[in-house]
Amino acid sequence: MSASRDPNQLKYAKTHEWVALDEGIATVGISAFAVEALTDLVYMELPEVGRQLAAGEAFGEIESVKAVSDLYSPVSGEVIAVNEDLAAHLERLNSDPYGAGWIVRIRVNADEKLAGLMDRKAYEKQCAEAEH
Amino acid sequence: MGENATHSSSGAHPVAAQLLVDPPQSGPWNMAVDQALLEAAASAESIVVRCYQWSRPTLSLGYFQKLADRSQHRASASAALVRRASGGGAILHDHELTYSLAIPASHARGGPLAAAIRDTGLLYRAVHTSLIRVLGGLGVSARLCEAAEADAGRDQPFLCFERRSAGDVLCAGFKIAGSAQRRYRGAILQHGSILLQRSEAAPELPGIADLTGVELSAAGLAHLWLPDLSEALGLECRPVELDPALRLRAAEWEAGRFGATEWTALK
């Protein structure tokens, strides 16, 4: 379940979360670009299993040496799994952000339109614009 | 913007920014104003630079710190208490100049601060490098903490100024300035403290006056530092009063969050 995914096959939120959708289950993490920007991660807080999330709602927080940032759900639905090991192994966000660095799994609401999510190309364009 | 480009936005037109210089106020109000500025920055256009002080000695906990850990630090037991929205260690705010910068998400698309929005450490270093430059002109020799000197691991001291992270400002081996950020929907709030003088509520932390004999008032340092900081960040700051709508929103944040027991005891 934590095999590294092809980032080209994922969808991305403006706020740098990635989502892999498989039979109504969304696996969510944060992109390598975001991990690099945060640098030196020290702490992460994750949601409870069973929590209902709206698309765009903050579901967790991540702390680096310098900054605290919210994590936003790219989809609406119910949290059905949390990567409990991740908080103790934040280095996995650096080493394998699209695999072992997954954060939550969400059972996506039936009426979810995945509105506003970008493909890899559009996401890379957003990141490139931020760099220049 | 390169490593030092915040200081060398030379050639580029400065970006308009608002400057708030606040009198000493309570911890909950100070944090509420910063939160209101961050919230506004998620949708507004204007960068805000703020300088402020504290009306009484106040211990601010880092966002993730446990309230119970406060008992570790007896000297500050009688100080007021507030929990910040930013991370890091606890700070005893007393004889210090505090600043904040609220940078709207829209500045990620271009301009002198775009790279600083992407790179957490860049804004940190740019602000601190400007401070070091100004302190140098006042006879205070300070430098940035190198990455090799930074603390490793999670078990860090309770007090922020006993921690070391790359980019902190050191003077005679002691940390005299540090900053932290909170990010919200693409916008950044960076706030930080410059320790001017030792506080009775944190006697283990010497300030600039104790280390160098150079006595600075918060207002005096702000007056000297702001022109350099503005240039370093490529800003043209215009003094303003806190917008009435933001003042109202800050009052809501103060009542609903930073002044509320539930928030202070959140962790």
Image (tube, coloured by chain):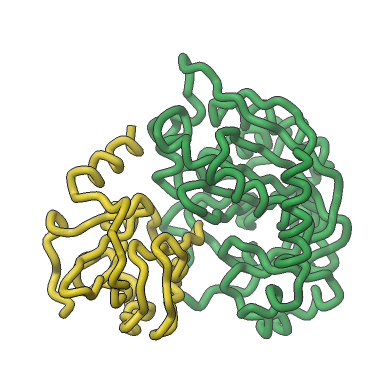
Chain colours: A yellow, B green
- Residue appearing at x 50%, y 78% in the figure: B155
Q: Which percent across, then down, holds residue B163? A: 57, 65
Q: Which percent across, then down, holds residue A43? A: 45, 72
Figure disc tally: 0
Q: Is residue B155 above or below residue B26?
A: below
Left or right of residue B215, residue A52 in this image: left
- Residue appearing at x 70%, y 78% in the figure: B262
Q: Which percent across, then down, holds residue B242? A: 77, 39
**Residue sitting nearer the eye, B210 or B100:** B100
Displayed quadrant of residue B32: bottom right
| Quadrant placement of the C terminus of chain B | bottom right
Report whether residue B156 is seen: yes
| Quadrant placement of the N terminus of chain B | top left
Q: Is residue A68 above or below residue B230?
A: below
Report whether residue A92 is seen: no
- Residue appearing at x 71%, y 57% in the figure: B31
